Amino acid sequence: MRILVLLPILRDDAIERETKKELARIASSTTQYEVRSLPSGPASIESEYDEWVTSPYILNEIVRAEKEGFDAVFVSCILDVATNAAREMVKIPVIAAYRTCAAVALTLGDKFGVVTIVDSVVPILFRKTREYGLVENLAGIRSIEVPVLELDAHREKVLESMVRESRILIDENKADSIILGCTGLVGMAQLLQEKIKVPVLDPTPICTKFVELLLTAGVSQSSHAYYKPPEKFRRLSNVPYLTGDS
């Protein structure tokens, strides 16, 4: 299996490093992971505006990945950026971080909490939860107020803040599992789980192993849910795999 783990931001050495470290930890002999960042787009995704800016470049990379022979793509962003659109454009599985983790959380318990990075992400995640029909299963969303690009420099503070916010979700909101609400928190699930004593879901291992399951079972997204976009003229630039200029 060849799986592309797409970081939908400009290259950040720390995030790439930690993502590759986690993938190396969980890798099987039958799976080849490749981590890529975007050549154009935002440095991080912390707003709806960032989502719109990055979406064409994400789609371009996913179409490219299918042409290059990848078997699946995991879009490594908790906001599930452009994943629905990508599923319309390719036949290979495209895996969304939040949607997948929420589904897994509901096989482990009844109510999940989310600990994310900054307050601006909270309403976006709530809207995603409502879109997925899971509001009654959401215990709450808390933020640690550390931006994506500062996570690596403050990992001890980040862990302390995640413990504090998780305990609020567990004790006051009755969460029985916690989802890491940013893929920049990759590799910290086990440390957090040891301290709070409930399942902690890190999107990177959860989603990459889930896509391996789909590939082993021979299934992908349904073409009756994600129809191929109609042929028509669309003016785009700097996205060659969408415009046919590659």
Image (cartoon, rainbow, N blue to C red):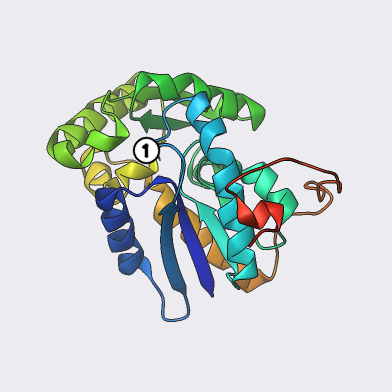
Residue 193, by quadrant, is top left
Residue at horizontal 86 percent and vertical 49 percent from the top:
231
Task: Residue 186 in the image: state x and y as whole percent.
Answer: 32, 48
Q: Is residue 214 visible?
A: no
Three-letter amino acid code of the residue under disc 1:
Ala
- Residue farthest to the bottom, as pictured: 29
Crowd tier of the residue under label 1, counting other residues whose Cα lies within 10 Å: few below 14, some 14–19, many 20 or above: some
Asked which quadrant contains residue 179, the reply is: top left
**Residue 195, percent from left and from top:** 21, 40
Q: Tell me the residue at 66%/70% (across/down).
A: 217
Observer-nearest of 175 and 73 = 73
Q: In the shown orientation, is residue 11 left or right of residue 58?
A: left
Q: Residue at x 55, y 59 (%)?
A: 73
65 and 96: which one is in front?
Answer: 65
State whether residue 140 appears in this view.
Answer: yes
Q: Relative to 64, is 238 above or below?
A: above
User: Quick one: quadrant of the C terminus?
Assistant: bottom right
Using residue 95 as the reference point, say whether residue 209 is left or right of it. left
Residue on which disc 1 sits: 43
Question: Which part of the image, by quadrant, shows the N terminus?
Answer: bottom right
* Mark 1, secondary structure of its residue: loop
Q: Position of residue 2 (x, y in %)?
A: 52, 72
Residue at 50%, 45% in the rendered image? 97
